[in-house]
Image: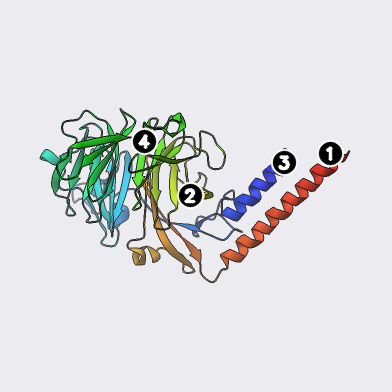
Amino acid sequence: MRYIWLLSVILFALLSGCAPQAKVKSDGPVFFPSAPNPPRIQFLLGVGNSRDVEGNETEVSLFSMNAVENEKAKHFIKPYGIAAYQEKIYVSDTLAGKVAVINLAEKSFEWLKGAYGPGKLKKPINLTVDKQGNLFVADSIRKKIVAYDNDGNFLKVYGEAYDMVPVDVAVDARRVYVLDRSRSKILVFNRRDGELIEGLGQDSEDPVGNLSLPTNMTLTDKGIFYVTNIASGRIVKLDRDGHVLNTVGKMGDGFGQFGRPKGVATDSQNRFYVVDSAHQNVQLFDENDRLLMFFGDPGLPSGSMNIPAGITVTDGALPYYQQLAAPDFEIEQVILVVNQVGKDKVGIYGLGKRKNFDYEAYYKESQELLRKADESRAKREAEMKKK
């Protein structure tokens, strides 16, 4: 009976694109799920340092006659958070105390220029960008949110008079929301004057709905927070008033469960993505909290994750990213994931579909296989009861 139940789970995984991932040839595109399933996500590019962005030209010293590429390259030490605005990618490095500003189309990799003096960073964890391109960085050692304009110039800090340990930040037109690990709360600040308004996340009558050692969060345009919690292994969904809408997952190693949930992001189709640094992958859910697929598991020649942390999803600059995709694969969203160790500190993936392939027909056929398997299981169980 356990075997039959497992078969049903596998068939459901095939339907949802959550099939076990086989190794692929290193000289071809890496897709998730792997063949023979129709592809939904392609690994597009990995960035390990500035040379991966600017090019691999090396200079030769007249004295040593050795390439001095490593002296010129800008390297990540231990990156964590990531955000995107149009063609810009921002990556926070916790050990370097810096934020990288990357523009792949322009082949540029620079450190945030306003991070000195009052804008200096010590341990930037996570960051976000508003609709105007202003950058907000959560610094856990400064215990502040540091804001910069679209050009990287320092603007102001939030939380000056409050003892907090900010690990993530979100913003809207009127508020700055700070995920405070020390209180396991979302602190709400007035964006204009920086005054603290309230704290969210500890008011649920059901303890499962309260934040518990939260690490990352995101805020949707509809005003819904998704918060990952290390202590409970759950994603808590809250509205802007702090009401718990739902919780997703729990601690475990099954489908839809988490070992160490970190980064969380949503896309324009209301899907949400959760990084699991323990399982070293990303799980993708629809707006009804149904698991659709997972990707990035270890063992691939490229596209595998290595202690992943931050994630962001964007549909900006799609024409550029489309150039990196396979000719018959059309990208709808771009997923950027930070790996804390390994060669590719930033993994870039495209969510899309193969052209001229009927995904609906495939899913319908898979659903029919699942239905027949369930019927067969029920029939065998009925026969066993008769005996």
Query: Alpha-carbon neighbours of circle 2 within 10 Å: few (<14), some, or many (≥20)?
Result: many
Dot placed on the residue nearer the N-terminal end, 4 or 3? 3
Indicate the secondary structure of the residue bearing disc 4. Answer: strand
Look at mark 4 in the image and give the residue it sits on.
215
Mark pair 4, 3: CA separation: 37 Å
Residue 146 against residue 130 in the figure, above or below: above
Dot placed on the residue nearer the N-terminal end, 2 or 4? 4
Name the front one of labels 1 and 3.
Answer: 1
Mark pair 2, 3: CA separation: 26 Å
Could one spot residue 308 in this view of the protein? no
Left or right: residue 86 compared with residue 152:
right
Left or right: residue 146 compared with residue 94:
left
Residue occupying the far right of the picture? 387
Look at mark 1 in the image and give the residue it sits on.
385
Mark pair 4, 1: CA separation: 49 Å
Indicate the secondary structure of the residue bearing disc 2. Answer: strand
